[in-house]
């Protein structure tokens, strides 16, 4: 039975996109800057799939080289959709270019907040654009004292609600986020994701977000996942894939709490599943290190993935593996937001030659060909 695995390394871009200046991201280069500025930084197993060749094609001065394994191919992709967030990137990977951007806000209208608060039987504080750690330092103690959850946003199309797991309650936070999603959808406000951001700790000096985050996405368009499902092919989401696609086209979901958990889940599913498409997101690069502008942490996270990949590659056999990313998040770039970048595309046993493509939909096309779906 045919099998395929696509791993999205969340935010691992490889050089600013041609339109990066339009997004304030001229000169961004997540991988390029890590290789240039972190001493002795190498990723030998990704290199064996062609990563260094991809880097050299976009960065002519790139100095490293490595022999390639058999049956591998490599290229890079630009994003066409108007956006640089997780949802936009994954939806394009799955076959949908978004001509209309998701809605973004610096703060949300008062009447919208009132409707969410009334429906959720609470009062909200915040309503600003902020980083997740900054907002907890600023408002976490007030939240514990008053019981009012913290609502905030970012440069992405997100409405985020932070609340203390013990003082407010995890299930109550999830219910409030589901309420916010319903209110947005009823109003026709195209916010890509409502994100529950639970945290723990007793005061501003030790507040810490937990791994119990949950995303509530806008309902997606029909994607390669739906087409596979319609053809009777199992589709298995790992990490936050099911959240990103609002469960559409997902036969079964395996949420994870970290990259290590995600890699262990991939190992287990690859040993158990004898057919179907596994679609995995590894989020730590982005969530823990990109947004927090931590280059050393980002580099070490990539080293950990590369070491795991070295043990996983012999298990691929004649099946199809794709490794790519959904956007950039250059830890050397100003600010704390995603960066508009090209992404690597690395494959083992691809059903067709990889090309440098002007959008991310090449992934959906290759997966469709692997499973012999009718081509548009």
Image (tube, rainbow, N blue to C red):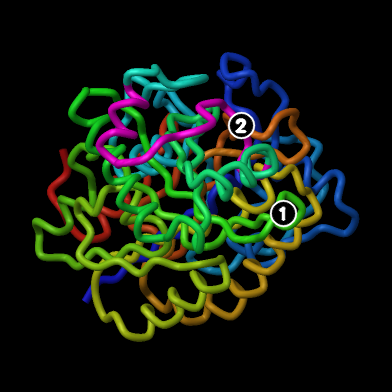
Q: Is residue 113 above or below residue 307?
A: above
Q: Residue furthest front?
A: 146
* SS of the residue under disc 1: helix
Snapshot quadrant of residue 27: top right
- Residue at mark 1: 298
- Residue 93, how many percent across, how many down? 37, 43
- Residue 275, how many percent across, how many down? 24, 75
Residue found at x 35% / y 69%? 254
Contact (CB < 8 A) between labels 2 and 1? no
Q: Indicate yes or no whether the magenta region holds residue 264.
A: no
Q: Is residue 148 visible to us here?
A: yes
* SS of the residue under disc 2: loop
- Residue 264, how many percent across, how many down? 50, 78
- Residue 10, how many percent across, how many down? 53, 50
Earlier residue among tags 2 and 1: 2
Q: Residue furthest right?
A: 39
Q: Nearer the viewer, mark 2 or mark 1?
A: 2
Q: Quadrant of the C terminus?
A: top left
Q: Quadrant of the N terminus?
A: bottom left
Within 10 Å of disc 1 (Cα), the crowding (few <14, some 14-19, many 20+) is: many
Q: Residue furthest top?
A: 22
| Marking on residue 309 | none
Count the marks. 2
Alpha carbon separation for disc pair 2 and 1: 21 Å
Where are the magenta residues, as a range? 112-133
Q: Nearer the viewer, residue 265 or 61?
A: 265
Q: Nearer the viewer, residue 216 or 365?
A: 216
Residue found at x 35% / y 53%? 174
Q: Nearer the viewer, residue 107 or 266?
A: 107
| Marking on residue 130 | 2
């Amino acid at each position: 039975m045919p099998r395929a695995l696509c791993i999205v390394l969340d935010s691992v871009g490889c050089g600013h996109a041609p339109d990066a200046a339009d997004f304030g991201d001229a000169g961004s280069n997540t991988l390029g800057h890590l290789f240039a500025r972190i001493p002795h930084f190498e990723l030998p197993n990704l290199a064996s799939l062609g990563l260094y060749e991809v880097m050299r094609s976009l960065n002519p001065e790139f100095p490293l080289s490595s022999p390639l394994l058999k049956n591998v191919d490599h290229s890079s992709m630009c994003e066409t959709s108007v956006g640089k967030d997780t949802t936009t990137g994954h939806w394009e990977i799955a076959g949908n270019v978004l001509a209309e951007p998701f809605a973004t806000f610096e703060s949300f209208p008062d009447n919208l907040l009132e409707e969410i608060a009334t429906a959720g039987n609470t009062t909200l504080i915040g309503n600003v654009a902020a980083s997740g750690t900054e907002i907890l330092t600023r408002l976490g103690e007030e939240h514990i004292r008053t019981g009012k959850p913290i609502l905030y946003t970012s440069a992405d199309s997100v409405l985020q609600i932070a609340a203390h797991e013990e003082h407010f309650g995890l299930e109550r936070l999830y219910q409030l986020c589901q309420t916010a999603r319903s209110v947005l959808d009823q109003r026709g406000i195209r916010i890509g994701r409502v994100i529950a951001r639970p945290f723990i700790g007793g005061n501003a000096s030790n507040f810490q977000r937990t791994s119990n985050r949950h995303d509530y996405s806008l309902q997606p368009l029909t994607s390669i996942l739906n087409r596979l499902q319609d053809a009777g092919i199992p589709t298995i989401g790992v990490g936050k894939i099911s959240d990103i696609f609002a469960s559409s086209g997902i036969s079964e979901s395996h949420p994870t709490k970290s990259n290590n958990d995600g890699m262990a889940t991939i190992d287990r599913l690859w040993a158990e599943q004898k057919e179907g498409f596994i679609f995995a997101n590894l989020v730590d690069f982005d969530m823990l290190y990109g947004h927090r502008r931590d280059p050393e942490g980002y580099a070490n996270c990539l080293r950990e993935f590369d070491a795991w990949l070295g043990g996983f590659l012999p298990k691929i056999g004649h099946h199809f593996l794709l490794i790519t990313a959904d956007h950039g998040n250059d830890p050397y770039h100003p600010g704390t937001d995603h960066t508009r970048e090209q992404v690597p595309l690395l494959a083992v046993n691809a059903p067709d030659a990889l090309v440098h493509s002007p959008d991310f939909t090449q992934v959906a096309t290759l997966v469709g060909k692997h499973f012999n779906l009718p081509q548009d």
